[in-house]
Structure formats: structure tokens, C-alpha cells
Amino acid sequence: MNESAIRVRDLCKEFIVSHSGYASLKGALLWWRNRHRERLQALKNVSLDVRPGECVAIVGRNGAGKSTLLSILARVYKPTSGEIALSGRVAPLLELGAGFHPDLTGSENVVFNGVVLGLTRKQVAERMEEIVAFSEIGDYIDAPVRTYSSGMLLRLGFSVAVHVDASILLVDEALAVGDLEFQRKCLQRISEFKQSGGAILFVSHDMAAVREAADRAIWMHKGAIVNEGATEDVVAEYENSS
């Protein structure tokens, strides 16, 4: 239990932002001398660990680098430098509706996402009833997801993520969209996931959810870790800084 499920060391991420002002490739090529590129450092030497059976929350203002960190752990971005090590299957829930095809039905998207996250079609079929029941979207499971509300997308996305036998759960602001009852249901599932030895790293602006779910908290600002430690201590310092 001392070995980290998530291990990050000296992680840096830079994005190149072009200020050429041209919308077309042709314009950029013809006027390349006038282009100006800026390096945006989204993460600066970030190091952290999350152990099995632990839930760690990341707090901070918009632009702090929280979502970029989770995206790197989910293999959406490649780091500029540094090391990451993940022990076990990862279930990411990074963006509302991400990975859902709008013209496919809810059940078709469940199959697609379940397979992407490592299940076989047979395993998805065996869990379909439980996934739909947890999501509470009822007969809408047979409707195209483009007809879903944001809350319905959240419910289905979260339900798939917690039914794929993952050992690591990455959650970005998912709890902020659902209603109070579903938020409590998600928090209960997170508690069960921890008790089974799963590791959770989640980003949230909802300090009540952070206080309830997180064993530890990490405060990020402008791409760097400002403080980490006991949840109440870090959250209180963060709130007092606002």
C-alpha cells in the first residue's frame, strides 16, 4: 500500500502559442516573418504521489494547470519534460461528453467507451444494465446523446468510468454539473472505490465536495504547486487567498 498508484516527478508542460493573426495556412506562410510565437508554461516542475486507497483533490483558480495535469496523466497530452508512472488501468472523466459520439445512442456510446477503457464487448454487455441504472437516464439510453442535457452526459460518463474495473480514476469537475442527489451518489461511489484500493485524483472548484471526498488536497497556482497536505488546511488557505 506504500507504493504509489500515481507518481509524478518534475513534470513540465509548454504550449506554443502563435500570434500571427492569420486564419489561413497560406497567410501564415506568406507572412512568416511577422509571426510571433510565445511559450506558455502550463506546468512547472510538478511532483506528487497518490497511493492506492487514497483520494487527492487539486484546487486552484482557472489557468492553474489542474486540467492540463489530468490530461497528461490520461495520455491526452505529452509532457515537455518530467516523469509519470501509473500503476493499473486508468478511467478518465476529463470533459463532459468527451469520447461520446453525438449521433450514436447512449447504449452505443457505452459500448464504445467501455471498449476504449479496456473492457471486452461481452463485459460491457454484462454491465450494461448496472451502468444504465446508475446513470438514471432511463429510456434515453436508446436516444442519440446529442439530445442529452449536460446532466445526462455527466451521469452516463461517470457511470461508465466507475464500471470498468479501473484502479485509477481521474475526474475533472464532473461533480459540479449533477444535481445534489447525484453528487452524493457519486461521492458514495468514490468512497467505495477508495475502500476497494482505488486511487482518485480529481479537480474541483466545489470546496464542499473536496472537503467531503479528499484525504489530501493540492493547491496549484500558475502551473506550480503552492501547498499540499491535509484537506481542511489546504482548502482554508486557498479560500483565504481568494
Image (cartoon, rainbow, N blue to C red):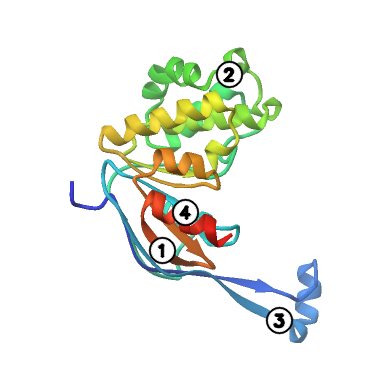
Location of mark 4 (residue) = 236
* Whether residue 159 can be seen here: no
Which image quarter: residue 92?
top left
- Establish if 47 lies above or below 239: below
Secondary structure beneath disc 2? loop
233 horizontally vs 7: left or right: right
Location of mark 1 (residue) = 227
Residue name at image x 46 percent, y 30 percent = 186
Q: Which residue occupies the extreme top position in the image?
A: 139
Location of mark 2 (residue) = 137
170 horizontally vs 17: left or right: left
Q: Nearer the viewer, mark 2 or mark 3?
A: 2
As measured in the structure, the alpha-carbon distance from the residue carrying label 2 to the one carrying label 3 is 48 Å
The tag earlier along the polypeptide, 4 or 1, is: 1
Q: Which residue occupies the extreme bottom position in the image?
A: 33
Give residue 208's position: percent from left, percent from top.
Answer: 50, 40
Q: Residues within 10 Å of mark 1 (few under 14, many from 20)?
A: some
Give residue 135's position: percent from left, percent from top.
Answer: 52, 22
* Whether residue 214 can be seen here: yes
Give residue 227's position: percent from left, percent from top.
Answer: 41, 63
Q: Amino acid at mark 4?
A: Ala
As measured in the structure, the alpha-carbon distance from the residue carrying label 4 to the one carrying label 2 is 36 Å
Front position in the image: 171 or 209:
209
Q: Which mark is residue 36?
A: 3
State if disc 2 and disc 4 touch (CB < 8 Å). Answer: no
Which image quarter: residue 48?
bottom left
The tag earlier along the polypeptide, 2 or 3, is: 3
The tag earlier along the polypeptide, 4 or 3, is: 3
